[in-house]
Image: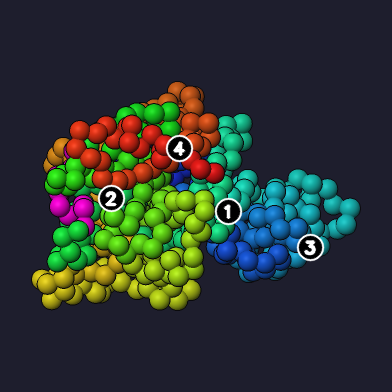
Amino acid sequence: MMSESDSERLVRVGRGTPMGELMRRYWQPALLSSELPERDGAPIRVRLLGEDLVAFRDTEGKVGLVDAYCAHRRAPLFFGRNEECGLRCVYHGWKFDTQGNCVDMPSEPADSPMKAEVKLLAYPTVERGGVVWAYLGPRAERPPAPDYEWVRAPETHRHVSKTLEACNYLQALEGGLDTAHSSFVHNNDLRDKRLLRPKDGAPRLEIELTDYGYCYVSHRKSGADGAYVRVYHYVMPAQQMRASTTAITGGRAKVPKLDGHVWVPVDDEHTFVYNWALGYDPEAALTPDFVAEWETYAGRAKDDLIPGTFRLKRHPGNDFLIDREMQKTRTFTGIKGLNTQDFALQEGMGPIADRTREMLGTSDRAIVAMRRLLLEATQAVERGEKPKGREPATYRTIRPHDAVVPPGSDWRQTFAGELVAKW
């Protein structure tokens, strides 16, 4: 159970709030690179940490992320002309570059000094791993660009997608860090006894605090074979890294992979979930067929989305199209898609869950540890200190792994060669 004051501190992400100021100390995914496919193409709306912005790719290929409204009369720049290295407001023709500088002001006299004085709000961006990352914090506090293994991997071995979730980022993040729920929510074949996680719904957890957040390990009984051990990483402020092998999925996955999520607050009541997958072996690329199968199994393939959006067709308004007959006979939830199953429960908690009424158990240790780290980090920022997880040196070599560990074996020794980044 959390106090109301701690919960409020964690869930509010607007500028000036404790969590909002913490989130602004990190690079945040703002959009997929594929959303800006061409130079001088159409700008797109972006809402990030409660701020309304517009993104555009200029003539030189640079991505600008600027205030959604013109500095002149607050006209929407979404309707602007993206041309000749700048976004031009169609109301009076004022034009701004990716740095927010006003480079043309045709509605004013040519000798007016006003142009040099006008500055549009603009945030730094970098493109890495198929994602446009933005930094919304103090310029003097800007950390190095993101350098996770999955952003360094070649495009042939990496896939990134995103989905919009209608709830606060924290309950989405908590769902990701909750390893016990996968034994139940994601049991998609009640008849398949090969699936390892459903065999043991009460995993034993180890948590080791690190300079990037923590490493946590779940242990599940696996009969005479030993124990199924899964090593995860929580990277502050809101990323999870995990492994999924063919042994775990009952043979569904054709390519063993690493995957994870970055949960990005749109505002207090909406979250963009960035989903990444990385081929486990540098010698084995992620094939288009595998990527399509993975997204379909997750329930977030193109056909699962409302056209023109990143919102699932299955949503609270239609009860996520739950099939009660399927729930009786085939799957634990009766809802298709891993992503969709998570959304049904996390969105079903309401836009912001009431944590003052929860009752936590031993399987919630990772959630408790994450909350404590974030609370401590907000306090560190208030003291003028730098929070954990900003420096690439702390996280760039980490990698998750999972496998069955034989009886009497130490997972640390068994996994020693697998927990180090290959790229």
Q: In front: mark 3 or mark 4?
A: 4
Q: Earlier in the sequence, mark 2 or mark 3?
A: 3
| Residue in the foreground of this view, choosing between 209 and 84 | 209
* Dot 4 amino acid type: Val
Q: Earlier in the sequence, mark 1 or mark 2?
A: 1
Tag shown at residue 154:
1
101 left or right of 198 in image: right
* Figure check: 372 above or below 110: above
The residue carrying pointer 4 sits among few (fewer than 14), some (14 to 19) or many (20 or more) residues within 10 Å by Cα, namely some
Q: In front: mark 1 or mark 3?
A: 1
**CA separation in Å, label 1 and label 3:** 31 Å
Q: Which residue is mark 2?
A: 175
Residue 115 location, x and y as percent?
Answer: 79, 51
- Quadrant in which residue 211 is drawn: top left
Q: Secondary structure at mark 3?
A: loop
Q: Residue at x 53, y 31 (%)?
A: 393
**CA separation in Å, label 3 and label 4:** 44 Å
Any magenta on residue 200? yes
**CA separation in Å, label 4 and label 1:** 17 Å
Q: Which residue is mark 4?
A: 420
Instruction: Assess whether mark 1 and mark 4 are in contact (beta carbons under 8 angstroms).
Output: no
* Dot 2 amino acid type: Gly
- Quadrant in which residue 135 is drawn: top right
Residue 311 location, x and y as percent?
Answer: 39, 68
The residue carrying pointer 3 sits among few (fewer than 14), some (14 to 19) or many (20 or more) residues within 10 Å by Cα, namely some
**CA separation in Å, label 1 and label 2:** 29 Å
Q: Which residue is mark 3?
A: 84
Q: In front: mark 2 or mark 3?
A: 2
Instruction: Assess whether mark 4 and mark 3 are in contact (beta carbons under 8 angstroms).
Output: no
